[in-house]
Image (tube, rainbow, N blue to C red):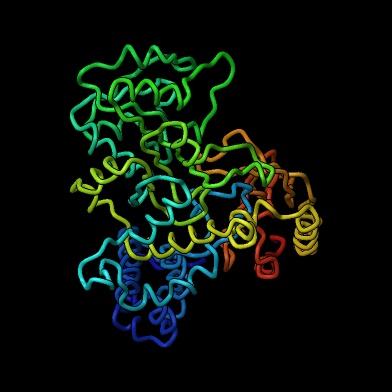
């Protein structure tokens, strides 16, 4: 493609001229004049620095595609999650029920009684409805909500252990997403980490030996995103609770993914629930809202009234509190759990888990039939067994039987080019590359008709 050089760059149209051009009217309407103006200025600045510009840069029509590439990548967009990781952190984790938005529409688009007690006409508690549901679902005497599970842990430690010691097993010093590590969170919370035991074996006596006058509480971290197997030992919640209480200390359990119901009924390994841990003697249990619970991002704290109230009174609580949209959607989702007999039909996460083999086979056949005339014979298209996983630090080492449409090519570059083109579709299709093939796991292939229509934009590269 021919380019403009040096003195010819003076012929670039002015920014205001481009903004008024009919060819860019749709772009301006979609993204706004300010964003388009900045993108235009950035393009022309780069060309002038390089002392070179594409030939189309002298006419408004040429800018439309470049602006779309520059601006569309900055917007949030729905995607098809065909990675085989159901709770994909990078793809928004748990999807919410469509009905949830209908249920909360008036609450978030009109004034609501967020912190107003209608009975007394005075200021009320913003978390009251959610707290009531959490108490019923977990058996806890009190509950509160912050914006994620790491924030919940930080609030608990800052409230109950500021400047004091907190013993933790070395085998539970986890790293969570984004390279955030438990010791760093504890340091920021203002407490002192006391490592006990070894990576693979921690005895109850290790905790007992670490308790002194400066100890504030005992902390146990559930291994929701890792497994240590083999020659291992770790004291259980009941043992730790008995030790903590004998010393006048509370026990906090960071449950992480936070299943509210026993997942064994859906063919998955048992995950401890907050109710079980409280029944075993834990004084506080913290867990996530957007993992196995299947709701919005939130950190939930349940347990003893005095400890929860102390967390509420901490000034840090205001900085970490959940907004009205989060509370409304969380309240709706928790309401689904109060009708467990219909939960599997209403919660998207459980719908994904409960897909039958027949539905998986139908999806795989429909997708492969759509792709074959577009990609073969240059690419090979097949249907294969695909071990899906829960993801987001939930049920590590456990897989869920699934099916995937696989796409192969003799050249790695061609495969990666197609992988990129899938991400460039009107609704991007996100799969994974493994064993020299693209894998499109069909558990996330919903709505199927929309996915097949989107795939129609693919064509075999020339």
Q: Locate residue 100 relative to residue 307 in the image: left or right.
A: right
Residue shown at 34% from the left, 82% from the top: 19
Can residue 421 be seen at all in this image of the molecule? Answer: no
Point out residue 296 in the picture as x, y percentages from the top left corner. 44, 56
Of residues 329 and 304, the one nearer the viewer is 304
Indicate the position of residue 453 as horizontal and vertical percent values.
68, 70
Q: Is residue 229 above or below residue 402?
A: above
- Residue at 20% across / 48% down in the picture? 313
Residue found farthest to the front: 119
Question: In the rendered image of this protein, does residue 170 appear above or below residue 141?
Answer: above
Q: In the depicted view, which residue is nearer to us: 348 or 447?
A: 348
Q: Is residue 45 left or right of residue 406?
A: left
Query: In the rendered view, does 393 fall on the left or right side of 244?
Result: right
Can you see residue 148?
A: yes
Point 44% across, 82% down: residue: 26
The residue lying toward the viewer, choosing from 5 and 188, is: 188
Figure disc tally: 0
Using the image, determine if residue 212 lies above or below residue 8: above
Q: Quadrant of the C terminus?
A: bottom right
Residue 335, position in %: x, y?
49, 61
Residue at x 33% of width, y 50% of height: 144
Q: Position of residue 256 (x, y in %)?
A: 45, 39
Left or right, residue 100 beside residue 124: right
């Amino acid at each position: 493609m021919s380019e403009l050089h040096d003195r010819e760059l003076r012929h670039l149209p002015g920014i205001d001229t481009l903004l008024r051009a009919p060819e860019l009217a749709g772009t301006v309407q979609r993204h706004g004049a300010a964003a388009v103006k900045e993108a235009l200025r950035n393009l022309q600045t780069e060309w002038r620095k390089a002392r070179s510009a594409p030939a189309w840069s002298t006419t408004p029509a040429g800018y439309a595609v470049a602006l779309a590439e520059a601006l569309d990548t900055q917007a949030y967009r729905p995607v098809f999650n065909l990675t085989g990781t159901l709770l994909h952190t990078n793809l928004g984790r748990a999807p919410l029920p469509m009905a949830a938005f209908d249920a909360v529409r008036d609450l978030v688009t009109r004034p609501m009684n967020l912190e107003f007690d209608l009975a007394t006409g005075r200021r009320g508690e913003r978390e009251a409805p959610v707290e009531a549901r959490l108490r019923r679902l977990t058996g806890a005497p009190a509950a509160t909500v912050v914006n994620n599970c790491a924030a919940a842990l930080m609030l608990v430690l800052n409230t109950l252990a500021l400047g004091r010691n907190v013993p933790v097993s070395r085998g539970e010093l986890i790293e969570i997403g984004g390279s955030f590590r438990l010791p760093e969170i504890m340091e920021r919370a203002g407490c002192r980490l006391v490592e006990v035991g070894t990576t693979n074996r921690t005895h109850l006596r290790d905790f007992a030996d670490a308790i002194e006058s400066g100890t504030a509480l005992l902390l146990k971290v559930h291994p929701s995103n890792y497994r240590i197997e083999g020659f291992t030992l770790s004291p259980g919640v009941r043992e730790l609770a008995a030790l903590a209480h004998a010393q006048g200390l509370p026990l906090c359990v960071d449950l992480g993914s936070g299943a509210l119901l026993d997942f064994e009924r859906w063919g998955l390994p048992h995950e401890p629930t907050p109710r079980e841990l409280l029944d075993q003697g834990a004084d506080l249990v913290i867990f996530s809202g957007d993992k196995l619970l299947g709701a919005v991002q939130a950190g939930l704290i349940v347990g003893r009234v005095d400890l929860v109230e102390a967390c509420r009174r901490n000034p840090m609580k205001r900085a970490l509190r959940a907004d009205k949209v989060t509370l409304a959607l969380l309240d709706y989702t928790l309401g689904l759990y109060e009708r467990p007999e219909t939960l599997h039909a209403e919660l998207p996460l459980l719908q994904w888990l409960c897909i039958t083999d027949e539905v998986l086979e139908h999806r795989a056949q429909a997708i492969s039939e759509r792709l074959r005339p577009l990609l073969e014979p240059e690419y090979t298209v097949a249907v294969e067994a695909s071990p899906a996983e829960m993801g987001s630090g939930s049920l590590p080492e456990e897989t869920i039987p699934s099916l995937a449409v696989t796409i192969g090519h003799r050249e790695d570059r061609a495969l990666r080019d197609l992988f990129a083109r899938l991400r460039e579709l009107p609704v991007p299709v996100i799969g994974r590359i493994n064993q020299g093939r693209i894998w499109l796991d069909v558990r996330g292939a919903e709505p199927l008709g929309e996915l097949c229509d989107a795939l129609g934009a693919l064509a075999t590269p020339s």
